[in-house]
Image (cartoon, rainbow, N blue to C red):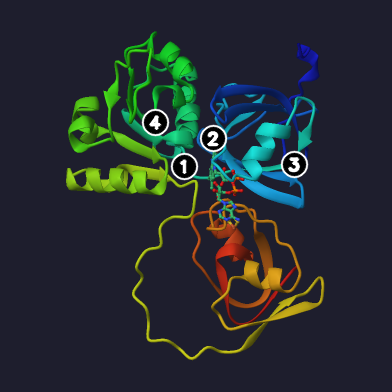
Amino acid sequence: MTKRQNWTTEPWADSELLECAMVIPETEDCATIAFRAPSGAWFDYQPGQFLTFDLPVPGGTIQRTYTISSSPSRPLSISITIKAQPGSIGTRWLLDHLKPGMRLRAYGAAGQFTSLRHPARKYLFISAGSGITPMMSMTTWAWDSGEMPDIVFVHAARKPSDIIFKNRLEQFASRVPGLQLRFTVEQVEPFSVWPGYRGRLSQIMLGLMAPDYLEREVFCCGPEPFMKSVREMLGSLGFDLAHYHEESFGAPALQEVPVEPAAPAVAAVMSFAGSGKTAACDGSETVLTLAKRAGLNIPSSCNFGLCGTCKVRKLSGEVIMVHNGGISDDEIAADYILACCSRPQGDVTIDL
Ligand SMILES: Cc1cc2nc3c(=O)[nH]c(=O)nc-3n(C[C@H](O)[C@H](O)[C@H](O)COP(=O)(O)OP(=O)(O)OC[C@H]3O[C@@H](n4cnc5c(N)ncnc54)[C@H](O)[C@@H]3O)c2cc1C
Ligand code: FES
């Protein structure tokens, strides 16, 4: 066991590698990985935020973003909970290769999907699949903060054995009346009785699970079609969507944007000051794509302007950047851009 004196009073900074301390199997193809800071630093973040990791997979380093599933109320270690889908490269590598003692570079914590930004008396957490991770962090935080939580925790899974954190949540819920668990599954399993809900989340089910949903601050995380159906359901039930917050693990569905009459494409040059390389551009490609075409690597993870991994400094020129919160107003004012979602408008030079 780590000796008490090995911890320092310093918070972890992402310049220090994280050391894998434990790998805890959760469900099929899903595990929680706990990390510690070798220096003994502690972890300061907001429940619901994420980290981005460098993963040394065969063929080169790639970046992947994972929500922190632990709570900052337990600051001596930090955990992520990962689930690999068929065909996965990064998550599969973590599940198959990461062992206690190995060290990885991680960036963050970052993200705005946190109950701390939206204090409320009552919460409704709605998740599906690995979208349960931020809800686990926020629930543990609420529990540890010492106030009686008022959380209706709705989770949808394919089958009962796919429900991540089921035992831990039931342990929390067995001790206080304010945490109400509402699981729904699409299939039941042989040899065990399923006492919960069955089928996809519907308006009728939601009314039974959380009759006072109109009074609750809602946090939702899961596959895009799931979140879309929750959004539409709440909207059609008269819920004020100013109190609805969601986190996407993949690129959000493209929205129909009214298109201006097409301006003739202008040939321009994207320049990379550090390497002296250039790429021709016409405003249709992102800085990330142009860098790749010039033979340069800008680390990137989400590719939709959320994680902040691809931040670079613009030295001159204009870009159109459509991001999802991965960059702050101060950084924009200091001429930083997210390469994955910025398109040059004319000649642009970046510091790469
Ligand atoms: C803010 C945020 C938080 C997140 N939190 C979590 C979390 O808590 N837990 C978690 O598990 N994940 C989380 N994710 C998702 C995670 O970052 C990865 O995107 C996800 O795990 C997929 O990466 P991968 O390496 O597993 O799969 P990848 O290798 O990126 O592949 C993704 C999928 O694409 C398909 N694919 C891959 N290569 C090809 C190909 N050549 N042709 C066709 N299809 C292909 C595969 O079917 C695969 O399932 C989060 C993402 C974001 C943005
Ligand atoms: S790769 Fe995530 S913001 Fe660009």
Measure the C-alpha gap from mark 4 to mark 2: 26 Å
Residue at 23%, 33% (x, y): give it: 213
Mark nearer the N terminus (4 vs 1): 1
Q: Position of residue 337 (x, y in %)?
A: 61, 65
SS for dot 2: loop
Where residue 123 sits, quadrant-wise, is top left
Q: Which residue is mark 1?
A: 113
State which mark lies toward you, 4 or 1: 4
Q: Which amino acid is tagged 4?
A: Ala
From the top left corner, tell me how far across and down residue 96 is, in percent.
69, 33
Mark 3 / mark 4, whichever is N-terminal:
3
* Quadrant where the N terminus is found in the figure: top right
Q: Could you tell me which quadrant the C terminus lies in?
A: bottom right
Q: Which of 196/68 is in front?
A: 196
Q: Relative to residue 42, is residue 173 drawn left or right?
A: left
Q: Which residue is mark 3?
A: 105
Asked if disc 1 and disc 3 are in contact, CB closer than 8 Å, the reply is no
Select label 2 or label 3 by which is in front.
3
User: Dot 1, crowdedness within 10 Å: few (<14), some or many (≥20)?
Assistant: many
Which residue is labeled 4 in the image? 157
**On screen, 135 above or below 331?**
above
SS for callout 4? strand
- Disc 4 under 8 Å from ligand 1? The reply is no
Going by the numbered disc 3, the residue's amino acid type is Arg
